[in-house]
Amino acid sequence: MPVVRDLRVLLRLRDFRRLLAVRLLSQSADGVYQVALATYVVFSPERQTSPGAIASAMAVLLLPYSVVGPFAGVLLDRWQRRQVLLHGNLLRAVLACGTAVLIVGRVPDWLFYVSALSVTAVNRFVLAGLSAALPHVVDSPRRLVMANAVSPTAGTLAATAGGGLAFLVRLVGWDSDAVTVLLGAALYLCAALAALRMARGLLGPDPALVQPGLRAALAGTARGLRGGVRHLAQRPPAARALAAMTLMRFCYGALTVMVLMLCRYAWSDTDSKGLALLGLALVASGVGFFAAAVVTPWAVERLESADWLGQEGPLRWVIVCAGVAAVLEPALGLPFAPAPMLVAAGVLGLITQGSKIATDTVVQSAVDDAFRGRIFSLYDVFFNVAFVGAAGVAALMLPPDGQSPVLVITVALLYAVIAVATGRPRPA
């Protein structure tokens, strides 16, 4: 099979394996850290969590990236990306240790959020850098779809595994969010050390574009962003893929808040049972992410001949994913029972990750390397704004126990709109 052959070739590429190792370690640390934050904010016995509280926490942690993200993109197109991966993970290791100290000290919430924000802010540079660097470690454009299936999906699975490891740490008796955060810090340190195995200039950008002075790079931020937006506007497939993925992220964010509230109140009478159900939802999503890595390259290849979908290449897979979600999400979600909702978590994991693989491929193929850093950072900003916006909408629609048929149906309709709008033929 061509898919299996391409996968074997990719895994024989030394630099691809090394970049993948950095992603796996970095995102497993993200999973550990995020679960520690979730359990501290949502499942602490002394806290009475509400949808509004969850939305507020997401806003505090994510919205500032609307400012940080564009700067990250412009800098990534000037800084050597290997150095970003090295120093970014080192900085996160130090900052995560600070978060652990604050948790032990029972400081005011605002100080805890500032610390958590500092850790996750650096994440914008690291994740955007990993995506922008990927074409530099793949030997042909044809295998870029497979690379996008393997690398980001493996990273998402690593984050899921990190989350599972965080749950395991608590189950074996280390019932402390601070200990879990320190485990994440250790993994960030390992990711930094793994980045040292790659040559300094391997991941781009082209040396002629690297500006050694920070002041010169920041001075060109506005011009760089305008150039990035113009570049994206001139590439309709990339712009359409980003729009579809942003709306799908909105859907995923709204459903995430709903599942958190269901685990906290509707499905459990104890915090430990709620955490266990949340852990099962993570596992189900992880299975979906893994399935996406296997299915997406095969599906994209098969859909090449499907002219009725109205688009070309990987965008056809985005259309199929959104259409399937529009049908299955209400069928599985409206019973508001744990078993079908866990199935829904797996299905939406496959759909969301499959669409992301396709979107990453479209953007990497359509966007010039000199613009990839800022485009992927804008991509990241869209993700954050959509997720926080979804949390805010969910906070207005959800009752205290999380059971809202209106929200489920609204999300299904939005998936249908995504499928129809993405499938519209481009103007001649």
Image (cartoon, rainbow, N blue to C red):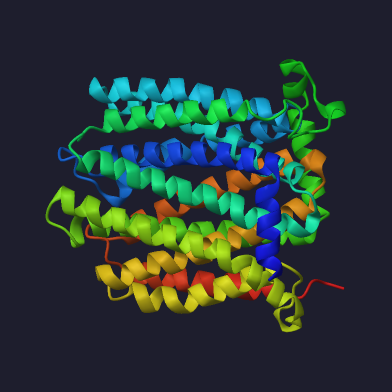
Residue 177, how many percent across, how many down? 27, 33
Return the residue found at the far left: 269
Residue drawn 52% across the image and 62% down it = 352
Evaluate whether residue 361 shows in this view.
Answer: no
Name the quadrant of the N terminus.
Answer: bottom right
Residue drawn 33% across the image and 43% down it = 165
Left or right relative to 341: residue 2: right
Q: To which quarter of the image does residue 146 belong?
A: bottom right
Residue 74, how many percent across, how many down? 72, 32
Name the quadrant of the C terminus.
Answer: bottom right
Residue drawn 38% across the image and 56% down it = 256
Residue 64, how many percent across, how many down? 52, 34
Residue in the foreground of this view, choosing between 325 and 201:
201
Residue drawn 34% across the image and 72% down it = 333
**Numbered-mark total:** 0
Residue 104, how many percent across, how many down? 24, 23
Residue in the foreground of this view, choosing between 120 and 417:
120
Residue 275 higher or lower than 208, as above or below = below
Q: To which quarter of the image does residue 38 belong?
A: top left
Residue 198 higher or lower than 354, as above or below = above
Left or right relative to 400: residue 363: right
Evaluate whether residue 218 shows in this view.
Answer: yes
Left or right relative to 344: residue 148: right
Left or right relative to 375: residue 337: left
Q: To which quarter of the image does residue 167 belong?
A: top left
